[in-house]
Image (cartoon, rainbow, N blue to C red):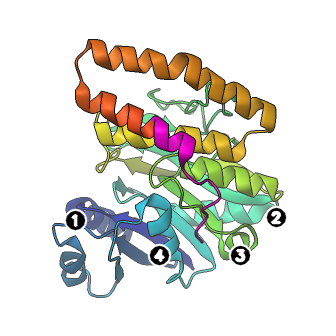
Amino acid sequence: MVSIITINYNGFKETSELVDSLRLYEDYPYEIIVVDNNSPNGDGQRLKERFPELAIICSDRNLGFSGGNNLGYRYAQGEYILYMNNDMTITAPFLKTLVKRLQSRKEIGLVSPKIKYEHHPDTIQYAGYTSMNPIRISNNLIGVNQKDEGQYDQPSPTAYAHGACMLTSREVIEKVGMMTEIYFLFYEEIDWSIQLKRAGYEIWYEPGACVLHKESMTARRGTPLRLYYLTRSRLLFTRRNSSFFLKIAALLYQLAIVIPKNIILYSVHGDKNMLGSFIKGSFHGFTHNIKKIHG
């Protein structure tokens, strides 16, 4: 059985649509665990009333992406664990294909499907990830915004899983550990992918399974919230995962180029909210305790 864990935060409509699509199309044995991350609009109770047969876990605080998923894992009964964003839907069964890929080689520890945009279902969002540039601390989605013409229909190892939809096993989690909770948002699945690879596992992209993504509903592009967590998490990721000399080079690059450039950019545009979020995110990225690992 697959335990599908999804996080809700003010997303009753999206979570309901995900559950409805799973019920309509998925035929592999599964359970659904919804973690409500202390939605201020009362979503937790609404979800319990809408889906009384599901495990709806109401957290008393917002635990972020990793914290919410880790909480859900503690209630999971399945041999396999699927972490899936609530802003996803499916139009065909996909779990069996992911499970078969995970089972195909003992070295495979984490699998993500092909991800396409729900509102443009012929367009790819994810067909794997490139490796991280160790100095710029950035990487790219493979196939992003390309029309799906079968060019990425070959299963293959990839640098990182996609946090919107990734399957692993209980055995892997018990060996490697749950996701670190230091980020709150962004870089969690990349960090976790690295931890799995250090433990000897491979990360795979499986195009035989496909899901549709509405994109993020909780941290929209171009907002101070998104900028703060992206800036903070990028620096935390480097401090946690880079070797000594690459870490020094990457942090110097941020200090000498990225931070001054963005401060000037936001100042020129008079965007005080974005400027404040960027400075705050940079400061916290350099000072936050990276050894704080929960789970």
At a point 71% along the width and 25% down the height, the residue shown is: 249
Q: Residue at x 20, y 80 (%)?
A: 45
Residue type at tag 4: Gly
179 shown above or below 269: below
Q: Who comes first in sequence, dot 1 or dot 2?
A: 1
Where's residue 92, x and y in %? Answer: 43, 58
Specify whether residue 180 is painted magenta: no
The furthest residue to the top: 268
- 280 displayed left or right of 220: right
Question: Can the viewer see residue 28 in this picture?
Answer: no
Asked if residue 204 can be seen in this view, the reply is yes
Cα–Cα span, label 4 and label 1: 17 Å
Q: Which residue is mark 4?
A: 72
Marks 1 and 4: in contact by CB < 8 Å? Answer: no
| Nearer-N-terminus badge (4/2) | 4
Q: Residues within 10 Å of mark 2 (few under 14, many from 20)?
A: few
Magenta-drawn segment: 282-295
State left or right for residue 197 relative to residue 59.
Answer: right
Q: Nearer the viewer, mark 1 or mark 3?
A: 3
Q: CA distance from mark 2 to mark 3?
A: 15 Å
Toward which corner of the image does residue 90 lie, by quadrant?
Answer: bottom left
Report, in whole angstroms, how far the alpha carbon at label 1 lies from the one at label 3.
31 Å
Task: Name the mark on residue 174.
Answer: 3
- Residue indicated by mark 1: 12
Looking at the rendering, in which quadrant would you find the N terminus? bottom right
Between 233 and 205, the one nearer to me in the picture: 233
Q: Quadrant of the C terminus?
A: bottom right
Residue type pointed to by label 2: Lys
Instruction: Please report whichever mark, 4 or 1, sits nearer to the chain's N-terminal start.
Output: 1
Looking at the image, which residue is at 50% across and 62% down? Answer: 66
